[in-house]
Amino acid sequence: MIDYRIDRHTGVATYVQIVQQTKQALRLGLLEPGDKLPTAREVVEATAVNPNTVLKAYRELEREGLVEARRGLGTFVRRSLGAAPADSPLRAELEEWASRAREAGLEREDVAALFTAVLDTHYPAHTPDPAPAKTSEGDPS
């Protein structure tokens, strides 16, 4: 079962935080197909968020095909994401690196910036090709 942690200081909408945390659990193998998500009531009791916010997050996950609501039974995981299980050797290496970064005096934001810069190098974001320039050929003006 996943425990959602809501950070009201990030500026990220609460429902988006729930969606992101669910996807992270799916990527890490902490949630697998067939697993049941906590009920909206359970999430509300644990996080003090509006029930409609939880339902909005679950609808978004359902729209993306990651979960399915079964009337009277709850919301269940339909498929997983990624292939980075929580016990991956790469995770152990990252844990060691993060520990060294902290010992070196880096703050969380410093580590996040450094990691994001490295990610951007190895996983560049796909940007659409710019629109072709218009030519004056065949232009009636």
Image: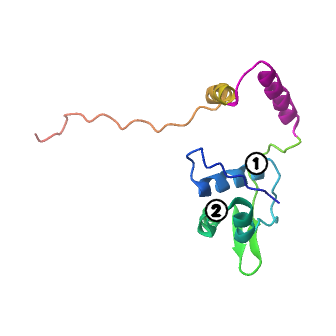
Q: Which residue sits at x=74%, y=61%? A: 46
Q: Which residue sits at x=83%, y=31%? A: 95
Dot 2 surroundings within 10 Å: few (below 14), some, or many (20 or more)? some
Dot 1 surroundings within 10 Å: few (below 14), some, or many (20 or more)? some
Q: Amino acid at mark 2?
A: Val
User: Which mark sits nearer the N-terminus, 1 or 2?
Assistant: 1
Majority secondary structure of the magenta segment?
A: helix
Q: Position of residue 70 (x, y in %)?
A: 73, 76
Q: Is residue 138 left or right of residue 130?
A: left
Determine the CA span between mark 1 and mark 2: 25 Å
Q: Is residue 38 above or below residue 90?
A: below
Q: Amino acid at mark 1?
A: Arg
Q: Name the residue tied to disc 2.
A: 49
Q: Which mark is residue 27?
A: 1
Q: Which residues are magenta?
A: 88-108
Q: Which mark is residue 79?
A: none
For the residue pair 108 and 72, the one nearer the viewer reads as 108
Q: Secondary structure at mark 2?
A: loop
Q: Which residue sits at x=75%, y=67%? A: 42
The question of residue 120 being in magenta is answered with no
Q: Secondary structure at mark 1?
A: helix
Q: Position of residue 127 (x, y in %)?
A: 49, 37
Q: Which residue sits at x=84%, y=45%? A: 85
Q: Position of residue 129 (x, y in %)?
A: 44, 36
